Amino acid sequence: MSDFKVIVISPPSEFPHESSWVNLLFENGLKYYHLRKKECPDFDIAAFFAGIDKHFHHRIALHGNPLWLSKGDFGGFHGSLDDQKQLTPDFSGRLSSNLKNWKQADDRERDMDYYLVSPVFDSISKPGYRANNDLLHIPHSLRHLPLVALGGVNALNTKLALHSGYQGVALLGTIWNSGDPLGAFLDIQQISVGSHA
């Protein structure tokens, strides 16, 4: 599947040398990076972008406040439909949103470039945030949607997500809690490429 997505979501707070790690991930095949700094409202977006090679900027999507889009050269935006209504008419980047259950997909008002569906497995970054087992059973009526599995995705369960019909995986804890973000990413990338060879 040529458009299979492996997405990395940033750690929610400051992470040492994050820009350097993100460059390494991009250089090794990462296509999508979501900048989500929930625990860090004063995060220096300009400094972050200054550390990212310019030809990778379009691969970065912003989570959260649409007003922050002016602080960096973002190629995408991830947020609720209400958040997306605040985007300027000239925004032409990728749009994505969350799905926590299949009813939300039935109620969607517009199509997204992709949906992050969670929690598919028990969360790594949020202890106690348990999997919604129903999310491993994608209804036939929704299999045409670009669904990306989020929540507890790791090297042991990536194949299960793919065989369940997901068109990608999103990684947070498995990358940033690993001690080796690049190695953790390459492990998942290898599994996903092998499953779609």
Image (tube, grey):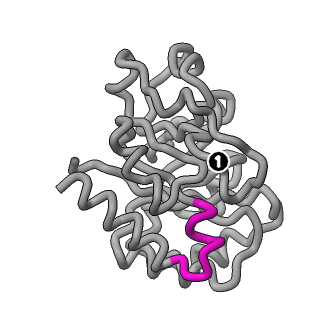
Q: Secondary structure at mark 1?
A: loop
Q: Is residue 196 magenta?
A: no
Work out whether residue 73 or residue 37 is closer to the camera in this orientation and state it.
Answer: 37
The residue that label 1 is drawn on is: 122
Q: Quadrant of residue 165?
A: top left
Viewer-proximal residue, 61 or 144? 144
Question: Is 126 situated above or below 80?
Answer: below
Does residue 73 appear anywhere in the picture?
A: yes
Q: Residue at x 60, y 60 (%)?
A: 172
Residue 176 is one of the magenta-drawn residues: yes
* Number of on-image labels: 1
> 160 and 27: which one is in front?
160
Residue 87 percent coordinates (x, y): 60, 38
Q: Quadrant for the C terminus, please.
A: bottom left
Residue visible at 59% across and 20% down in the picture? 104
Residue type at tag 1: Asp
Image side of residue 82 versus residue 21, left or right: right
| Above/below status of 111 relative to 186 | above
Q: Is residue 88 visible to us here?
A: no
